[in-house]
Amino acid sequence: MKDREIVSKLIVLVVTDRISVREALLRFPETSGDKNILAAKYALIHFEADEDLRARDFAFKEEQNDYLYMIAELLSNGKDLPKNIIKSYENYYPEIELPKSKTIKNLLKTLYKFLNVK
């Protein structure tokens, strides 16, 4: 719960131009398996990637700001993000877990997961 509150505050700081996305990402807590935090992380990455579009299109900027504020509010209240949001980021940015032991089997599993091989 505390990690979600931290992420929520970081998102608000970014949207209000008090810190950069890079600084926020450096302050991000470990996801510890919380897909809500991971989705919020990638939402911020997309926010930064769209910087040029945000500068040209005020409506897009407002929509993206509202989206991030919604994410921040849900996390601040300890609620889960909508499943469609989490799923959309899972599809493009699967988090790769490092193997717990250094056996060849676990190293191959990680490599297969990274390469998206079944």
Image: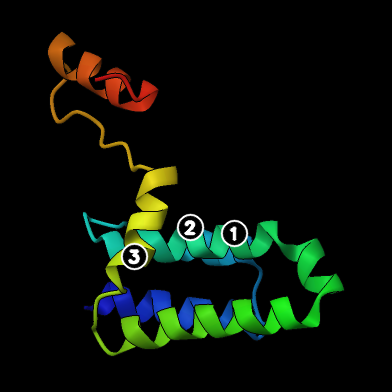
Residue bearing mark 2: 42
Where does residue 94 sit, x and y in percent of width and height? 35, 42
The quadrant in which the N terminus is found is bottom left
Where does residue 43 sit, x and y in percent of width and height? 50, 64
Q: Which numbered disc flags the more N-terminal residue, 2 or 3?
A: 2
Mark 1 to mark 2: distance in Å? 6 Å
State which mark lies toward you, 2 or 3. Answer: 3
Q: Which mark is residue 46?
A: 1
Furthest-top residue in view? 104
* SS for callout 1: helix
Mark 2 to mark 3: distance in Å? 14 Å
Question: Does the residue at mark 1 contact the one at mark 3 (Cβ under 8 Å)?
Answer: no
Q: As rendered, which of 72 and 59 lies closer to the eye?
A: 59
Q: Residues within 10 Å of mark 3 (few under 14, many from 20)?
A: few
Question: Does the residue at mark 1 contact the one at mark 2 (Cβ under 8 Å)?
Answer: yes
The picture quadrant where one finds residue 104 is top left
Residue lying at 25% horizontally and 78% vertically, measured from the top left: 2
Relative horizontal placement of residue 24, taking residue 32 as reference (left or right)? right
Residue bearing mark 3: 84
Name the amino acid, label 3.
Asn
